Structures are given as C-alpha cells and as structure tokens.
Image (cartoon, rainbow, N blue to C red):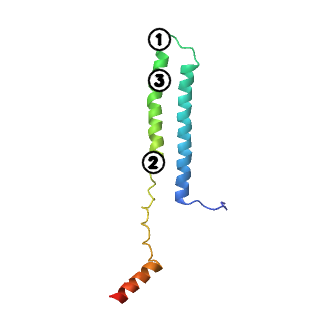
Amino acid sequence: MFNGPRYTPDELMARLKFIVGLTLATTLTGIVFVVLYSLIFVVQPMTQSPNDAKFFELITPIATFLTGILSGIMLGKSPDEKKPEEPAKPQETVAEQVVEEVEDEIA
C-alpha cells in the first residue's frame, strides 16, 4: 500500500511540532491583526461599547493561552530524546608521544 520510505519517530515528531506550531502561530498572528484592524481602521465612539469590551475580554485569554502553548511546544523535548553523548577523549599526538619517550629515556 505505502511504497515510499517510512519516517522515523524523530522525523514524525519534528513534522508534528512544525505543523502545530505553524498553525498556532498563524492563529495568534490573525488574532493580533484583527484586534489591530478593529482599533485602527474601524470608527470608534468616544466611550467603549459593551460589545467591544466583551470582545477584548474574550480575546486576551485566548491570545495568552495560544502564546503559552506555542512556547511549550517549541521548547518541549520529545520523550525519545537521548542525552547528548560526551565527546570522545582526544587522542595523543605524535609530539606528545615523542616527549613521553624522551622523558622515559632520560629517567
């Protein structure tokens, strides 16, 4: 049925994070632009209407929630991530070997 190469779990997690992050970022950007548009280009009365007050009261926690989720997804680690391996011990250079041989001969 599926003849192409299979993705590894790490690749699938990376793709999932990318798609979810992109969707949430697009939603958050849309909310910001709608709020800015409603403030800048729509004629506003001198006093804030009750509908506008409820609109901003509703949008504020949604935007905060989306920001928190977006940062959590981007900063979170997958459960399969392994600790980074320690770097290998550097090998002795030829000069160090010669110095050791000369010191052994002198001693």
Where, by quadrant of the figure, is residue 72 drawn?
top left
Q: Which residue is mark 3?
A: 56
Q: Which residue is mark 1?
A: 47
Mark 3: secondary structure: helix
Residue positioned 56% across, 20% down in the render: 40
Work out whether residue 20 or residue 85 is closer to the camera in this orientation and state it: 85
Q: Residue furthest top?
A: 46
Residue positioned 49% across, 18% down in the render: 52
* Alpha-carbon span between mark 1 and mark 2: 42 Å
Q: Position of residue 76 (x, y in %)?
A: 44, 49
Mark 1: secondary structure: loop
Residue positioned 48% across, 14% down in the render: 49
Q: Residue furthest bottom?
A: 105
Q: Which residue is mark 2?
A: 75
Mark 3 packing: few (<14 Cα in 10 Å), some, or many (20+)? few
* Kind of residue indicated by mark 2: Leu
